[in-house]
Amino acid sequence: MENVLVENYAAEGKSIARIDGKVIFIEGTIPGDVVDIQLTKNKKDWAEAYPVAFKKFADNRVTPFCKHFGICGGCQWQMLPYDKQLINKQQQVTDNLSRIGKVEMPPILPIIGADKTVGYRNKLEYTYATRRFIPKDEFQQLRADDKLAEEIEGTIGAAGFHAKGQFDKVVEIDVCHLQDEPTNLIRKAIVGFAKEYKLTFYDIKNHEGWLRNVMIRMATTGEIMVNIVLGFEDKKAQQSLIDFLLHEFPTITTLLITINRKFNDSIYDLTPVAYHGNGYIIEELENFKFKISPKSFFQTNTQQAEKLYQVTRDFAELDGKQTLYDLYCGTGSIGIFCSKDAKKIVGVELIDDAIKDARENAALNNIKHSFFTTGDVITICNDDFFALHGMPDVIITDPPRAGMHDKLVKKLLEIAPPIIVYVSCNPATQARDLALLDEKYKVTKIQPVDMFPHTHHIENVVQLKLRGEEKS
């Protein structure tokens, strides 16, 4: 299809065009672009497509600041000015809550944007692989010059992010702008060291090779963690790499090695070993300190996490008399952040390692009125549990993107605390859950928070009050 005018924004970073009454969802475009498109999915009333040529750029389109934009897939909206990104994210929240939730709502508060739109991530994970993804334009040029086979055979290893839809290839990154230095310098130094000493890169297809991944975490305290994931143990090579990195980057606070012999990249069932430092770093939100280990979940944008938690605490309306339940509590960060204004904090989380971190974080902050436990809230929140810990006056729930299980929604309706604060990274599933909670609850406040500039992702905080008590 040629000369298609992109008209409006859609969800998940796509935009919308209409042709003969059919809605076309197009990736990589913004309203005002005129493009030729190739359909990838075609249904009766809608279709999906990608642009094959731009005939005219939208007037408000800007030049992406990253040369890998459109290839690595980490950012979707670098071509859109940040103020326009915020408008679109605000609209996403409005559309999801009104079209899916269909509940009575107050006006949605203006989105809280980020002061820092580059270098905002405190955590990045890079992949090392034997195969480099070759972008289309470079591929065609290499083929035209009859150098394609030479390039493929000459690739010793690459480091970066998985190419979209290519599980065995990585986009070789020069500079990633999402995390401050020394992130790129460390990643490149490891590549250089491995190539110089002929250490093998991981081949995911054949499940062989030494160098697999590196995770870099950087705290606002200045502490830096590096966790190198290897396919097998080679003590001599490991020690040489460790010595090299600590010499080149003396600011590294702690350096760990994780041996992963599995087919997948998850480290949650593995044991990272600290070879330098104590194996964790300390991050701060306001005056609270948090111990972050390689397997800890922690919001990846520290500055915006502080704003998100401040909204959550405000919506909880604590005055020192309430028992606060923190569901999906993870490492306890939200509950701890709210602890000064609560009589008691009760955190519930399915992952035992996260609860161990939560207890350590509570001790680190000298919080004695907290209780963190591993379990499923659906089963453990019974009469005996409430008799021991008290009925919740406020519940904060921060589920994964899939939202809350319908059994948990029913449990909340059964418990019926006066206030629920729902923190969500997916307004669509949040809207679905709000519709279910509407039986007993009224939505009283809504606050979007942008945690991830240049992406379509958005966090949203909703306050709900038990009907009949919303004016109290």
Image (cartoon, helix red, strand yellow):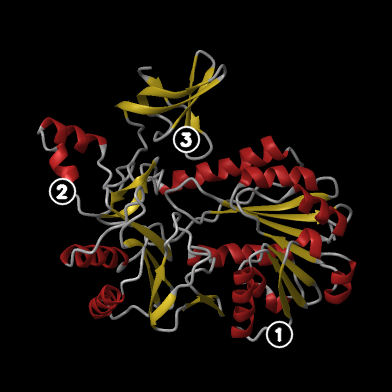
Front-most of residues 343 and 238? 238
Q: Does residue 349 appear to the left or right of 158 in the view shown? A: right
Q: Quadrant of residue 143?
A: top left
For label 3, count other residues whose C-alpha is less than 10 Å away and answer few (under 14), some (14-19) or many (20+): many
- Please name the amino acid that badge 3 sits on: Lys
Q: Upstream in the sequence, badge 1 or badge 2?
A: 2
Dot label at residue 154: 2
Q: Is residue 129 above or below residue 316?
A: above
**Distance in Å between CA atoms under marks 1 and 2:** 59 Å
**Which residue was labeled with disc 3?**
14
The x, y position of residue 37, in whole percent, is: 37, 23
Q: Residue at x 65, y 58 (%)?
A: 398
| Residue 309 sits in quarter | bottom right
Badge 1 amino acid: Lys
The numbered mark at residue 368 is 1
Under circle 1, the secondary element is loop
Seen from the viewer's position, the closer of residues 158 and 225 is 158
Q: Residue at x 51, y 44 (%)?
A: 87
Point out the tag, 2 or 3, that comes first from the N-terminus. 3
Q: Which of the image's four quarters has the N terminus?
A: top left
Nearer mark to the viewer, of 3 and 1: 1
Question: Would you say 117 lies left or right of 94 here?
Answer: left
